[in-house]
Image (spheres, grey):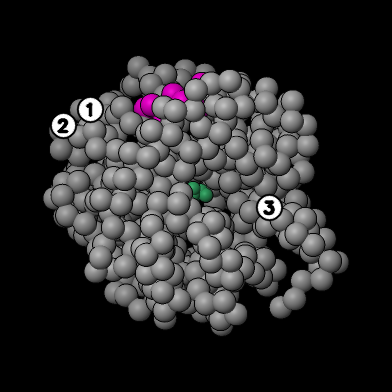
Amino acid sequence: MTTTPAHRADLLAQARAVLDANWRDGFTVPSARQYPYQWSWDSAFIAMGYARYDQARAEQELRSLFAAQWADGRVPHIVFHQATETTPYFPGPDFWQVEHSPYAPVALRTSGIVQPPIHATAVWHLYQHAADRERATAFVAEIFPRLEAWHDYLYRERDPQNDGLVYICHPWESGQDNSPLWDSVLARITPRPDQIPPYRRSDTRSVDPAERPLDFDYDRYIFLVDFFRRRAYDDRRIYTDGAPFLVQDVLFNTLLCRAEQDMAELARRIGRDPTPFLTRGQATAAAINARLWSEEQGLYVDCDLTTGAQIAVPALAGFMPLYAGIPDPARSRRMVRRLEGPGFGVIPDGPGFPAPSFDRTAEGYSPRRYWRGPVWIQMNWLLMHGLHACGYPRHAARLRRAIVELPARSGFREYFDPETGAGYGASAFSWTAALLIDVLYNELTDE
Ligand code: GLC
């Protein structure tokens, strides 16, 4: 499929229309029916799209997310702004009950867990593409202390062994809810029926259940939330009481490492010392290389903190350290060979629709079910930048083509079939639109 200038202009207009429809006077919902509130890492990606054509909106998107930051620095994964939607959402604020924590905000209702820390990266993106630099510098100065408190929270509360890697305590914290990455950990969790609070899923109401997680997984998601709320979201208690899910995740730590590098850039713009951020980022990069590389897989894998063992399964997330410049050239080459293989099919000019979120030749793969195989636009976007920066522009170009082609064929869907290109999950999905905008702006400037 070739994109003519007219076709690009049309796609841009459609993408902006998606964001306009999802804008709620201060923040953007990922999708009006399926996710009718503000999500943390969605907002960061969405702000990167706005940064290309509406600086004020990009700033406001992040400002309204950070307005819900907890007193301990955590940025909650959902902010339940005053509901404008009629669609009920589960788990909503009444289920999370974060008011039990002394750190939760009083003015806004939120969830009690977090998502990948890509916010400083979004702010740096916003600065770089700002039409009004002076205004951007003022925004950096305004939000910098909040970003700093967010990263401090992660290193303080989520790295109990002080080894440079932070843990996540729920699959939702990874952003990759039902990835096969979590299968072995979730299988170990065997709550009695009375330990799972009664609940009713809302996610399978407007999306085909075949495209969503299984009830087995959902029971465990809810059991874990209950475990946290019983401990008032106190990370130390959660850790010392033996939380059943503690994982040092590649994607989460990579994005933190990259965000620290971007904090150093931001620090320089406002006369702050970049050194502490660079030092912390380097320590995380070194830990990722030392602890999360799998020689057998030829990519990075998560570590199950409960057993100390690597979770040796081939998820696309295992290639993300390219995005923070973490692997050396030899490891990068190995990863690219693996990416080119039948499991991921990221070959310049290759067929199909890269890149599946999970190796299509591995056990646990499904082309349709959520994080077990479908293509996600934000994962393609991260990997595209990583491959480009590490010296693989033709592989990066293949991913860029998929970022444009998939929504052009199948609409602004939440995820796509890597084999047929069919769209699945929510429709009119915000980060699919926002990142398409970002990529199209790059194409326009390149020419
Ligand atoms: C799903 C995704 C997560 C995303 C959220 C809102 O839970 O797995 O990554 O942030 O939806 O779009």
Q: Is label 2 in a helix, a strand or a loop?
A: helix
Give me the disc on residue 240. 2
Is the distance from the Cβ of mark 1 to the nearest ligand 1 atom less than 8 Å? Answer: no
Residue 397 x %, y % = 61, 68
Q: Quadrant of the N terminus?
A: bottom right
At label 3, which amino acid type do we have? Asp
At label 2, which amino acid type do we have? Thr
Residue 41 appearing in the image: yes
The CA distance from mark 2 to mark 1 is: 6 Å
**Labels 1 and 3 touching (C-beta < 8 A):** no
The CA distance from mark 1 to mark 3 is: 39 Å
State the image quarter where residue 437 is shown: bottom right
Residue 253 x %, y % = 37, 45
Crowdedness near tag 1: few (<14), some (14–19) or many (≥20) residues, C-alpha within 10 Å: few
> Residue 414 vs residue 159: left or right?
right
Q: Mark 3 points at which residue?
A: 438
Q: Mark 1 points at which residue?
A: 236
At label 1, which amino acid type do we have? Arg
State the image quarter where residue 14 is shown: bottom right
Q: In which quarter of the image is the C terminus?
A: bottom right
Crowdedness near tag 2: few (<14), some (14–19) or many (≥20) residues, C-alpha within 10 Å: few
Question: Which-is-in-front pick, marks 3 and 2?
Answer: 3
Specify the segment rendered in magenta.
145-153
- Residue plotted at (24% across, 37% down): 163
Residue 224 x %, y % = 27, 42
Main SS class of the magenta portion in the image: helix
Mark earlier in primary sequence (1, 3)? 1
**Labels 3 and 2 touching (C-beta < 8 A):** no
For this rendering, which residue is in front, 271 or 121?
Answer: 271
In the rendered image, the vertical position of residue 306 relative to residue 163, given as above or below: below
**Labels 2 and 1 touching (C-beta < 8 A):** yes
Q: Is label 3 in a helix, a strand or a loop?
A: helix
